[in-house]
Image: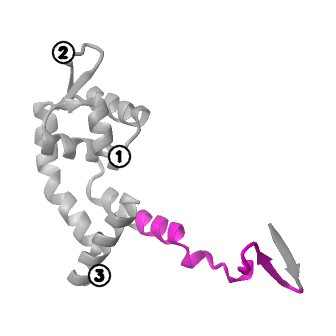
Amino acid sequence: MSAEHGRLRVLAGGRSADAYDLSEQVGFVLRKANQRHLAIFASRISDLTPPQFAALAKLHEVGATSQNQLGQLVAMDAATIKGVIDRLKARDLVVLEPHGRDRRRLVVSLSDEGRNLIETLLPDALEVSEETLAPLTPRETATFLRLLAKLAEG
């Protein structure tokens, strides 16, 4: 709710709507930084989407795991991870098998082709991160990543 005071709009709590500058808002700046990162990613890793890459990289890191657990590990909801896994399976990059004790659950693992692909792409992914962070000094990078992690934890 806002009240008009002359030409200055005052929001509840006494804050001025005229003081709002989109270019200084965290969501806007994060989106622009993410767009830059995604462009760098696409220029180096055009074979996979970032979510597909994340799923393969996490499987490479942790080994076979349930589809649900993989979704949690890569911060994707159940519907999103299912779509990602379905596309990776269609490309023979992952294998799905029923869970040993719970037949309703699926265990996802890398196929040989998936393992070869992710092992080939991991050095490129490191370069993507380096290029994304290139405008920052090493100290700024460490601070930035620490603060981003703090924001992500909430």
Kindly identify which numbered label has been placed on residue 101: 2
The answer to whether 80 appears left or right of 134 in the picture is right
The image quarter in which residue 137 lies: bottom left
Assign a secondary structure to mark 3. loop
CA neighbours of label 1 inside 10 A, class few (<14), some (14 to 19), many (20+): some
Assign a secondary structure to mark 1. loop
- Give the residue type that dot 3 points to: Leu
Q: Looking at the picture, tell me which residue is in the foreground, 108 or 53.
A: 108
First reached walking from the N terminus: tag 2 or tag 3:
2
- Give the residue type that dot 1 points to: Ala
CA neighbours of label 3 inside 10 A, class few (<14), some (14 to 19), many (20+): some
Quarter that holds the C terminus: bottom left
Visible residue check, residue 132: no
Visible residue check, residue 2: yes
Residue drawn at 85 percent across, 75 percent down: 3
Judging by the rendered image, the residue that carries numbered circle 1 is 75
Disc 2/disc 3 C-alpha distance (Å): 48 Å
